[in-house]
Image (spheres, rainbow, N blue to C red):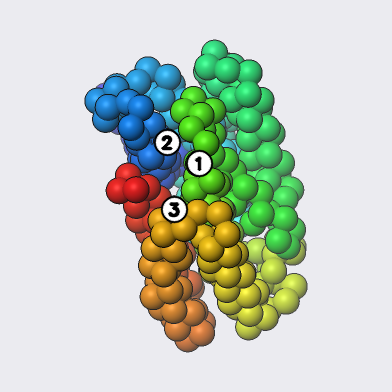
Amino acid sequence: MAEKNGYFLAGLLKVTRIWNLLIIVLAQYCTALFLAHGSLSNEEIFFSPTLFLLSLSSVLIAAAGYIINDYYDVKIDLINKPQRVVIGKELRRRVAMFFHVIFSFAGILTGFFLSWKIGIVNVFSVGLLWLYSNQLKRLPFIGNFSVALLTALSIYIVHFIFPASHTLVIAYAAFAFSFTMIREIIKDMEDVKGDTAFGCRTMPVIWGIRRTKYVIYGLSLLFVITLGLMSYNYIGSHLAVLSAGLILPLAFLWYRLNKADTVREFGFLSSYCKYVMLFGILSMAFF
């Protein structure tokens, strides 16, 4: 029985992407450190029950989103990433759906316990995650946009409990949005074989790999220009440092993307974007 329970727990941890959930927590705590700097001590921020509950609600909803996404994508994942398929192997489909519902409701209720604004954001997030998994991810651009929007919201929502007026937080949310958008498009390039087989109409499927690369070049360039303009007009040196710091990572991304044409190379670039975004969010703690 113990072995069976361990097998089940391992499957649940895999399907909910435990390391990605920890990144959400880390990002929200870094955001809180930035927003509350000067008004609260680091100890007060780290041990804030409100911040803990906010992160808990975000993690529960993200976990539910990962579960429902894998639930609908089992057949596609058997082509794209057969070694990563958990639902139907290590976790029964009924059990997966049970945890999706429990995590979703728990995240929503925790959000409303904190404030009606957070509760509404959580309801919106659960609904969008279900719609994305069921339909939107099979469409060009809008599926990528949905995930990027939810990532940006996970940063900005901290502003509801630490309401310092900082335009820089919006800039960081935009940073998270942009790199998530780029990463999601690259993941579609990585998964083009399975997506094509099951009739998904992602950008790489309908436009091809080469044209999709041009979209990524354009999006990343637009983001850097927008960030630079925000720095010049509204914020100043802090955002200028972030903008300048993105030049080398983006140059490396463009270089490797231009050469990439295999699943392994696109997988590397997807992970690379995640780590660039993580280090960018961590820089909030130093500002």
**For the residues marked 3 and 1, what is the alpha-carbon distance in whole angstroms?**
40 Å
**For the residues marked 2 and 3, what is the alpha-carbon distance in whole angstroms?**
38 Å
The secondary element bearing badge 2 is classed as helix
Is the C-beta separation of discs 2 and 1 under 8 Å? Answer: yes
Q: Nearer the viewer, mark 2 or mark 3?
A: 2
Q: Earlier in the sequence, mark 2 or mark 3?
A: 2
Residue situated in front as seen by the camera: 163 or 1: 163
Three-letter code, disc 3: Arg
* Residue that mark 1 sits on: 166
Residue 226 found in image quarter:
bottom right
Residue situated in front as seen by the camera: 277 or 285: 285
Residue 184 shows in this picture = no
Q: Nearer the viewer, mark 3 or mark 1?
A: 1
In the rendered view, would you say 199 is above or below 172?
below
**How many marks can you see?**
3
* Residue that mark 2 sits on: 35
Q: Position of residue 230 (x, y in %)?
A: 57, 59
The secondary element bearing badge 1 is classed as loop
Disc 1: CA contacts within 10 A as few (<14), some (14-19) or many (>=20): few
Q: Residue at x 47, y 86 (%)?
A: 259
**For the residues marked 2 and 1, what is the alpha-carbon distance in whole angstroms?**
7 Å
Q: Is residue 34 left or right of residue 259?
A: left
Q: Is residue 205 left or right of residue 285?
A: right
Three-letter code, disc 2: Leu
Disc 3: CA contacts within 10 A as few (<14), some (14-19) or many (>=20): few
* Residue that mark 3 sits on: 84
Q: Residue at x 49, y 48 (%)?
A: 168
Q: Is residue 196 left or right of residue 253?
A: right
Residue situated in front as seen by the camera: 51 or 104: 51
Three-letter code, disc 1: His
Q: Earlier in the sequence, mark 2 or mark 1?
A: 2
Q: Position of residue 151 (x, y in %)?
A: 54, 46
